[in-house]
Amino acid sequence: MKLLLVTVVEEFQEDILKLFKEAGIERYSGSDIHGYKELLSEKLIANWFLTEKDAIESAMFFSFTEDENTDKVFELIKAFNNQIETNNPVKAIVVPVEKWI
């Protein structure tokens, strides 16, 4: 059993859910999140406080799944990232799960 975590900008959410289905990941959870990038020093001086406009609308999906599903979704995400032109590629990590109930 593995824990798969995927972050994606809002415009690619539906694409990632299709990749989950193709990889055999049928059960997952998701949450809307705000992504932030490090501000350049000039922008930081001009804007002391981060505001909602500085955030990138994103989502995080996670699933407890089997090794073969994580391997397949990683292949699909790599292919997806290679065909898009963006500064915000899909990010994914896998964490081993030692115990579960």
Image: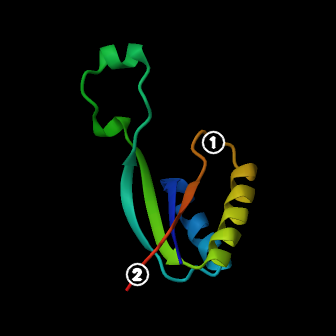
Three-letter amino acid code at disc 2? Answer: Trp
Residue 86: assigned label = 1
The residue under the point 38% across, 18% down is 43
x and y, in percent, of residue 83 in the image: 75, 51
Q: Considering depth in this image, is 1 or 8 the residue closer to the camera?
A: 1
x and y, in percent, of residue 34 in the image: 37, 48
Q: Considering depth in this image, is 51 or 26 the residue closer to the camera?
A: 26
Three-letter amino acid code at disc 1? Answer: Thr
Q: Considering depth in this image, is 27 or 93 the residue closer to the camera?
A: 93
Q: Which residue is mark 2?
A: 100
- Seen in the picture, residue 56 relative to 2 is either above or below; the reply is above
- Give yes or no for contact between labels 2 and 1 (Cβ–Cβ under 8 Å): no
Image quadrant in which you'd find residue 16: bottom right
Does 42 sit left or right of 9 as displayed?
left
Say which quadrant the C terminus sits in.
Answer: bottom left
x and y, in percent, of residue 56 in the image: 42, 44
- Seen in the picture, residue 42 relative to 35 is either above or below; the reply is above
- Seen in the picture, residue 76 relative to 57 is either above or below; the reply is below
Q: CA distance from mark 2 to mark 1?
A: 37 Å
Image quadrant in which you'd find residue 99: bottom left
Q: For numbered disc 2, what is the local secondary structure? A: loop
- Seen in the picture, residue 90 relative to 48 is either above or below; the reply is below
Q: Residues within 10 Å of mark 2 (few under 14, many from 20)?
A: few
